[in-house]
């Protein structure tokens, strides 16, 4: 009775986890102890997969423990690595594909860690079912272990049923389809309930309890049978086993319920239930005897029925009711599919325990981006204020106008600006940087174009193959897979376009100020000669207006120095939101990155923002006061054309210095931007190359499978082989060589006539039957020769309508002419050959004169060569 169903394991192709994971680790984490730890963890993970999937597994709990650890590790690292970007392709074969059990994909390759988890969990359920089936059910420990692992297998298959479609986002292979794994889960649950029936029987529990347990097991098996009945997704022996188990469990329930009826003095009901149990056992024995053994149960029921009938016939004389009138047996379930909750292994330790999940990494990256935006906004507003201040002072020729009261010497501020320009390399450094920009831009464009071209070429190939093979090309379209990469590439292209515009603005500004910048680069004597002279304004020396302007300019310089300090403080602020993000992910299952980051930024930069705003307001007030004071200074200052010309040159020199500093800063930032973007684009190119390589590998495997599938398909419709080619009787050793068959030219009918009804079997005498073997008698090509006539005699039972032996020694079969219109070539009874006017003798070979078929016409070449 103990026949249990176990599930075969899925087989996986070898996958190198180390290479893509190590690439991510080295690209994400700087060299150091943390990176070295993750490198070791990646190597351990690769070894763990080989142990779990790269070798045959014993039907033992230690092998199951390895599978559970690998499954737990997959669940742990899934949120920590960007698997869609790593292009890891996992290939698994259909567990039930043995060539002809059922249709479906033989194997499936997907770049999805969810697919890997699903297949590993299937193997967990399969191995658990095998371990349970190997248990010794004659002892209590074996029963407990079997029930435990059957429930684990049921839970694993049930979990796959609920998650496989969302994990794969495509049609799975038949073995892991929701219908198949749902059926497997029900079968495992049924077998677990049966184990409890066996345990209850072994523990000699009350008949009422055993009856309810067995009835519930029968109900489970019935449900499993219904699920298997209308689909060919499981091996052929599963269905009869489930049907037999349903009958046996129901018979067991009836048997124990009959014992309960006996205890209640309901002897008629006892007999009715035992009779019903007998019928159920007979059904199982007659239909499914090759799959299950019901002898022990049948003998037990038969003995109980015989004893019950004997007692009732001689003592009780209780009426035996109909089965339909019997009270229904109750049900009691002691099994439940084990829920899949990670970690499944009690010994599991996460190899990447310190690595934060990708959701946290992405949130940290987004938070850093928001932080950078805040810092850039504050620093940008301060630098913009500084540029505005410098522009206003240059337009007012301050402080050069206050230093130039003599009218002929170069103002000290102009000399300082000249020295600053020369120290930074002057025109040559800016021109060199400007010449380098187009080369850096072109390099980045080429990398981006090449990356997108790789994607375009692969997508074109994929579309061509999809058009060629139609539905057979059943992998994810490249266009759908590359959407995120193309969006990223378009973003890079927009960035490059904006950078080109910024470069143009810088070049235009340089062109506008290059003449004055060149003048600032000259020695002091040449600079003094280039500045027009003017009459001295000695009357303004010691003036109150001059003193007020100098005081206001000093305050403005203090405001600018305060901004420099503020900029340093803003850049120095650091914080890490990883802990907060981890806490939010653990508590809520999701991270509200925007709210958490905004709150932290307000706390960290709130005071700096206020100080910057105060600084900007103070500068605005000072500039207004300086403009008013400068108007008074200009009114008191003696004005002439020479003085105006000198003041214009000094203004241009001051503006040229400020522009030089800004242009130099902008070009250096642009150079750094292009160099940094080159590294980012190279990573993007590697990402594109990796995914295209993975797609190419997947494409080659799919093409190989399709070629094999096409090669197995018939090249032409099937047809029936003519009988003269397939059923040619073999000559008896030592006999004469049959004459070659010859095709005769004759008038062919327009349409094949319907054959007449099959004639009754001829009468054959025992003597003729013993001396002559049957020979087919096809219709002769012409009607000149009469058909052979069998001698009359007592009839004899006919055998099959085809020869079962070659004849007795001394008998030679006659050659047969091919006639495609002879009716009954395959169904006509074989009759002993006898020439006209000649009786059959044992062992007498036929004479040539009695050959009943037309001979070859003269001067006509035979269809087949003569022997």
Image (cartoon, rainbow, N blue to C red):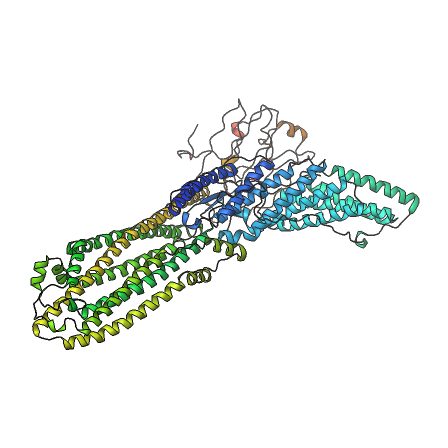
Q: Residue furthest top?
A: 734
| Of the pair 561 and 216, the residue shown nearer to us | 561
Q: In the picture shown, does residue 631 fall above or below 322?
A: below
**Residue 196: image location, x then y, percent:** 71, 43
Q: Quadrant of the N terminus?
A: top right
Q: Is residue 100 visible?
A: no
Q: Is residue 318 visible?
A: yes
Q: Residue furthest front?
A: 542
**Residue 412: image location, x then y, percent:** 15, 62
**Residue 127: image location, x then y, percent:** 59, 40
Q: Is residue 259 left or right of residue 631?
A: right
| Of the pair 546 and 132, the residue shown nearer to us | 546
Q: Quadrant of the C terminus?
A: top left
| Of the pair 855 and 113, the residue shown nearer to us | 113
Q: Quadrant of residue 17?
A: top left
Q: In the picture shown, does residue 505 fall above or below 284?
A: below
Q: Is residue 816 left or right of residue 478?
A: right
**Residue 32: image location, x then y, percent:** 39, 42
| Of the pair 242 and 648, the residue shown nearer to us | 648
Q: Residue furthest right?
A: 315
Q: How many marks?
A: 0
């Amino acid at each position: 009775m103990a026949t249990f169903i176990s599930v075969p394991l899925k087989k996986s192709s070898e996958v190198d986890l180390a290479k893509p994971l190590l690439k991510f680790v080295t690209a994400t984490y700087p060299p150091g102890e943390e990176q070295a730890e993750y490198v070791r963890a990646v190597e351990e993970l690769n070894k763990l997969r080989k142990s779990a999937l790269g070798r045959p597994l014993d039907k033992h709990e230690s092998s199951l423990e390895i599978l559970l650890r690998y499954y737990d590790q997959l669940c742990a690292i899934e949120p920590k690595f960007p698997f869609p970007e790593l292009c890891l392709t996992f290939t698994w074969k259909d567990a039930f594909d043995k060539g002809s059990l059922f249709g479906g994909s033989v194997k499936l390759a997907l770049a999805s860690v969810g697919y890997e988890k699903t297949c590993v969990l299937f193997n967990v359920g399969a191995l658990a079912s095998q371990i349970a089936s190997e248990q010794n059910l004659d002892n209590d420990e074996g029963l407990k272990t079997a029930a435990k692992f059957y429930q684990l297998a049921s839970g694993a298959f049930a979990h796959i049923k609920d998650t496989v479609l969302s994990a794969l986002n495509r049609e799975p292979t038949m073995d892991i389809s929701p219908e198949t794994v749902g059926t497997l889960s029900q079968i495992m649950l049924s077998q677990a309930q049966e184990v409890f029936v066996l345990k209850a029987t072994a523990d000699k529990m009350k008949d009422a309890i055993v009856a309810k347990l067995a009835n519930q097991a029968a109900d489970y098996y019935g449900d499993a049978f219904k699920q298997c009945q209308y689909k060919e997704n499981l091996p052929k022996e599963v269905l009869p086993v489930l049907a037999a188990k349903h009958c046996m469990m129901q018979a067991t329930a009836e048997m124990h319920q009959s014992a309960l009826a006996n205890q209640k003095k309901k002897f008629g009901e006892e007999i009715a239930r035992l009779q019903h149990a007998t019928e159920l056992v007979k059904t199982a024995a007659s239909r499914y005897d090759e799959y299950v053994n019901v002898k022990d149960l049948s003998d037990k029921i038969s003995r109980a029925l015989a004893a019950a009938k004997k007692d009732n016939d001689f003592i009780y004389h209780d009426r035996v009711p109909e089965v339909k009138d019997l009270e229904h047996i109750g049900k009691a379930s002691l099994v439940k599919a084990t829920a899949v909750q990670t970690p499944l292994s009690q010994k599991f330790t996460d190899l990447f325990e310190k690595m934060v999940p990708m959701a946290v990494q992405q949130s940290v990256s987004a938070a850093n981006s928001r932080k950078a935006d805040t810092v850039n906004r504050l620093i940008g507003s301060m630098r913009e204020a500084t540029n505005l201040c410098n522009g206003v002072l240059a337009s007012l020729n301050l402080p050069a106008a206050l230093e130039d009261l003599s009218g002929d010497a170069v103002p000290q501020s102009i000399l300082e600006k000249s020295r600053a320009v020369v120290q930074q390399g002057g025109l040559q450094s800016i021109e060199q940087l400007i010449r380098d920009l187009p080369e850096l831009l072109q390099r980045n464009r080429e990398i981006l174009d090449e990356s997108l071209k790789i994607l375009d070429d692969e997508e074109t190939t994929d579309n061509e193959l999809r058009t060629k093979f139609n539905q057979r090309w059943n992998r994810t379209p490249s266009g759908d897979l590359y959407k995120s990469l193309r969006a990223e590439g378009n973003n890079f292209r927009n960035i490059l376009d904006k950078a080109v515009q910024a470069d143009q603005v810088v070049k235009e500004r340089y062109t506008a100020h290059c003449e004055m910048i060149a003048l600032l680069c000259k020695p002091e004597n040449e600079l003094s000669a280039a500045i027009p002279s003017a009459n001295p304004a000695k009357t303004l020396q010691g003036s109150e207006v001059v003193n007020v302007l100098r005081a206001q300019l000093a305050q403005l310089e203090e405001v600018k120095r305060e901004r420099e300090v503020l900029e340093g403080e803003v850049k120095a602020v650091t914080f890490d939101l990883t802990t907060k993000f981890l806490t939010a992910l653990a508590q809520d299952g999701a991270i509200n990155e925007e709210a958490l980051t905004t709150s932290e930024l307000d706390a960290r930069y709130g005071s700096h923002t206020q100080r910057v705003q105060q600084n900007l307001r103070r500068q605005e007030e000072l500039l207004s006061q300086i403009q008013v004071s400068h108007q008074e200074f200009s009114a008191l200052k003696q004005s002439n054309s020479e003085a105006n010309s000198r003041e214009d040159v000094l203004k241009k020199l001051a503006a040229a210095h400020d522009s030089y500093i800004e242009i130099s800063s902008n070009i250096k930032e642009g150079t750094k931007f292009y160099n940094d973007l080159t590294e980012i684009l190279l990573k993007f190119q590697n990402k594109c190359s990796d995914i295209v390589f993975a797609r190419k590998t997947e494409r080659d495997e799919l093409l190989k499978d399709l070629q094999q599938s096409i090669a197995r398909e018939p090249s032409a419709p099937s047809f029936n082989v003519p009988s003269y080619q397939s059923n040619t009787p073999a000559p008896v050793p030592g006999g004469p060589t049959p004459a070659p068959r010859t095709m005769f030219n004759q008038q062919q009918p327009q349409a094949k006539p319907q054959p007449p009804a099959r004639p009754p079997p001829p009468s054959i005498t025992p003597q003729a039957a013993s001396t002559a073997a049957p020979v087919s008698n096809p219709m002769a090509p012409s009607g000149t020769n009469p058909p052979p006539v069998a001698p009359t005699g007592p009839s004899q039972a006919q055998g099959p309508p085809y020869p079962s032996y070659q004849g007795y020694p001394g008998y030679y079969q006659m050659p047969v002419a091919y006639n495609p219109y002879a009716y009954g070539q395959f169904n006509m009874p074989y009759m002993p050959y006898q020439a006209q006017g000649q009786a059959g003798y044992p062992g007498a070979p036929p004479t040539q004169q009695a050959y009943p078929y037309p001979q070859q016409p003269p001067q006509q070449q035979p269809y087949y060569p003569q022997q």
